[in-house]
Amino acid sequence: MQIVINIETTEIDRSLFATPNTHWIKTSSGYEGEKKLLNNLIMQGAKGLICSVPPSKAVVEQWLSNAEDDVFIAHPGLPKQTYPKGVIFQKVEISNEGLGVALSSMEQWFLKHSTRLAMPDILTGKSVMLVGAGITNLILALQLLDNGYNVDIFDQAPKPGNGHWSEHGCSNGGGDARMFTLTEMDNYNIKDRLCQKNPIFENNISSGGWLIQDDIRENGKQHEWLDTHNSIPPWLASVYSEDIYQLNAAAEPLWIDLVSNHNEIFQDVVHRDGILRLYNTPQQFEWDIVRQDKLGALLDTYDITYIKENFPSLKMACEKGKIAGGILVKGFTVNVHKFVQKLVELITDKGAKLHWNTQIDKVLRTKHNVVAGLLTGDTLLQSDHYVISPGVYGNELLQHTPCEGKIHGVLGAWLEIPNHKRLPLQKSLKLARKGHLAEDSNITVACNSRGHNALIIGSGYGYVGDVSEQKQYEQLINQNQLDVLYDALKDTAEEYFGDCLPEGADDFQPNYKYCIRPWTATSLGLYHSEVCSSGGTFIVSGGHNTGGFAQAPIIADAVLATLKGEQHPLHFIYHPERNHNFTRKYLTMKTGLKLPSVTFKTRVRDDTIKSDNPFRWLDKTTSEYFDGKRVVLFSLPGAFTPTCSTYQLPGFEENFTRFNEKGIDEIYCMSVNDSFVMNKWAEQQKITNVKVIPDGSGEFTRKIGMLVQKDNLGFGLRSWRYAAIVNNGVIEAWFEEPGRSDNHSEDPYGESAPDMILKYLSSSSTIAAE
Ligand SMILES: Cc1cc2nc3c(=O)[nH]c(=O)nc-3n(C[C@H](O)[C@H](O)[C@H](O)COP(=O)(O)OP(=O)(O)OC[C@H]3O[C@@H](n4cnc5c(N)ncnc54)[C@H](O)[C@@H]3O)c2cc1C
């Protein structure tokens, strides 16, 4: 989403808002100023404007007629005039804070809008296949069954329990303790307002970072992931945090409902209500009282005397000066293994069919890239709807969705220690040790495998990167760095719970464990839905960082909303393209987005016209060119220009049959040239397979963000070179030459060449199921 910022004050710190899609201008008042503003809005393909002086009605009308649909204006006062329908208006303060608010409101509006466009009209089917029997899909299964759906669940692992815990995803494999609080699923992008980069993934663990591998930049996928993490400005990271907390808060009543409606799954699972938060410094203690209160989580505040008297197991730590204070917050913990076992029993009783040891190898797509079923071996599985939540190792199943490549792995370590029976800890804890390597620990009251009281101290994070090839990740982990993490856990165990430990308990080695969690560069979870061939939906949810357990009921709620054809806040908060709104230049054209509606002025032959030049004008719309077909569209700077005439156009023309065999119905060549020029060029090149589309006024090219100035060659406005596979009017794959800019001194050609498109078509898992 492109946004023009036209403000007068110099008090704004522009560097905070310098993203690739914010364009800063300063216009004078009067006719010239208005003209400059309008030019900028149109040239940038802007959807939003932040301004200190509101634009005139005439400017807004012209802007609206050029924008695909509604536009958003943020301004300090109320508009003095009535703007036409289609203008969303917001009152903002022109300050660093106000600008952040305006930008994030625009982003939310844009996401809501684009998410709505991806919803199917009517959903009636009642059968749902779930891939992954992790905590998120198990809670979802329960909600689906309660809402009258038929559920099949597939997991590659054996049935949990009976010693099979570690083979599951991190729901089960990752230790036994899980916590719900209103600040679960924290945002790890939060950084100092003036610090543009949060280096946690760049520094190794012994230097206070999270890096547990030797060379993170070697792998291109990691490079991209880290760049995404680093590119998030501080104000945007704060917006993400608020959004995550909003989802946690919305999950709370759903947990309460689960406890009252399905109390059996909370029995005998060491279910403890209320979480005690402890702090080692008075500053953090005081700061967090305010924060937790603001979030509505604060239940009580405890000083040291109270903690000593009421929590005997913490007496020693208080006496040693390790605790500055504590607060009781909303939340609970369970032993997740027992909880999962009960959940599996309950949903089986309710009719869910669980298919253990069943790996889903592929999502089957038609030649139009529409999901048609799931493949396990040679068996095709089909239902009305599909929900894929494969945790950290399931990237293969996310291919051709915008979630692909976005989930990396972050190691979570924990240490289980026996809890001395004489000093039982009633509440699970969150311990903040400012400045310590195990800075934030979750200490969960649990039972060990023999049913004895135990404390599970979970802390420490280690970035292991892309673990989609499951077997390799162990080799990525630097054991020395892992040992540093384990030592930090041991230090917390000894310093805080030394007197809970049995005599001589100094060999902690067998009790150290780790597991890899799914993690996104933005800290936001992922949620994607698309219409499948059954007319139902195909949904991906995942990447739930530290809070997949806490958020499980709200994720289920969002899935149910999709199945009912309704919108849900999680759909746009966890929209997989969300961050790209602010970090990528021109979000406009990416996989999954619809082409704009444009009418092209073409000249067609008409033999009924008795003249030397039997051609007439014919208007053709984007729909007429693209609906119901899978096509290749390529665009170039100009007809008759060298690269276009020598390589690109002939390359597509000669390979037409190969494209056709790979499921392509048409190939279109577009240029910012009129129909006379395009037709003559096609005739001169003896083109019979490829069809030319004249975008003489550049309207289509501008609306997809590809219009660039080529004044250095005397061409004026032309198209940047790109190609796309367009499926029924929606972008399936996008190929763009690097370095798009005005007056570029070169004419890069390679990414959009026919060979690259053929390569994609060959590697794509698209199977012509129709
Ligand atoms: C030590 C630790 C402590 C944590 N503590 C908390 C906490 O206190 N609170 C909290 O909210 N969160 C916590 N988390 C995070 C939370 O556990 C995760 O976010 C959550 O478990 C993710 O659940 P999931 O269902 O999305 O994925 P997973 O649990 O990873 O489940 C995915 C499932 O999909 C299956 N699968 C994958 N690919 C395929 C395929 N191709 N075919 C068939 N099956 C497939 C896997 O076998 C797996 O069972 C913790 C995580 C760890 C590691």
Image: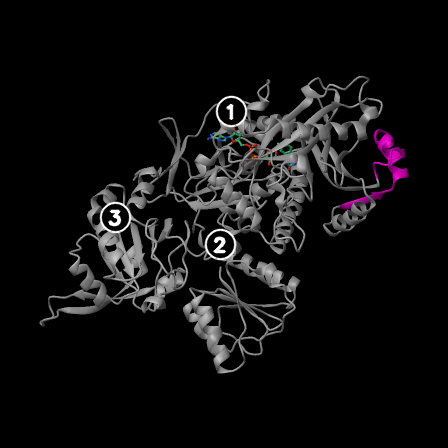
Mark 3 residue's CB less than 8 Å from ligand 1: no
For label 1, being within 8 Å of ligand 1 is answered yes
User: In terms of depth relative to the viewer, which is nearer, 135 or 223?
Assistant: 223
* Disc 2, SS: loop
Q: Nearer the viewer, residue 501 or 151?
A: 501
Q: Residue at x 25, y 48 (%)?
A: 665
**Residue named by callout 2:** 584
Q: Are marks 3 and 2 in contact (CB under 8 Å)?
A: no
Which residues lie in the magenta part? 298-323
Q: Residue at x 54, y 44 (%)?
A: 226
Find the residue positioned furthest to the front. 745
Q: Give, as a three-letter code, the residue at label 3.
A: Asp
- 322 is within the stretch colored magenta: yes
Please give left or right for residue 577 compared with residue 252 in the image: left
Observer-nearest residue: 561 or 679?
679
Residue on which disc 3 sits: 665
Q: In terms of sequence position, does the residue under pointer 2 or pointer 1 come before the other?
A: 1
Compare marks 1 and 3 and give the one earlier in the sequence: 1
Q: According to the image, label 1 marks what residue? A: 157
Amino acid type, callout 2: Arg
The mark closer to the camera, 2 or 1, is 2
**Is residue 270 shown to the viewer in this render?**
no
The quadrant of the picture showing ligand 1 is top right
Q: Quote the CA–CA distance across marks 2 and 1.
A: 38 Å
Q: Could you tell me residue 377's position as x and y percent? A: 38, 26
Q: Residues within 10 Å of mark 2 (few under 14, many from 20)?
A: some
| Quadrant in which the C terminus is drawn | top left
Colour mapping: one colour
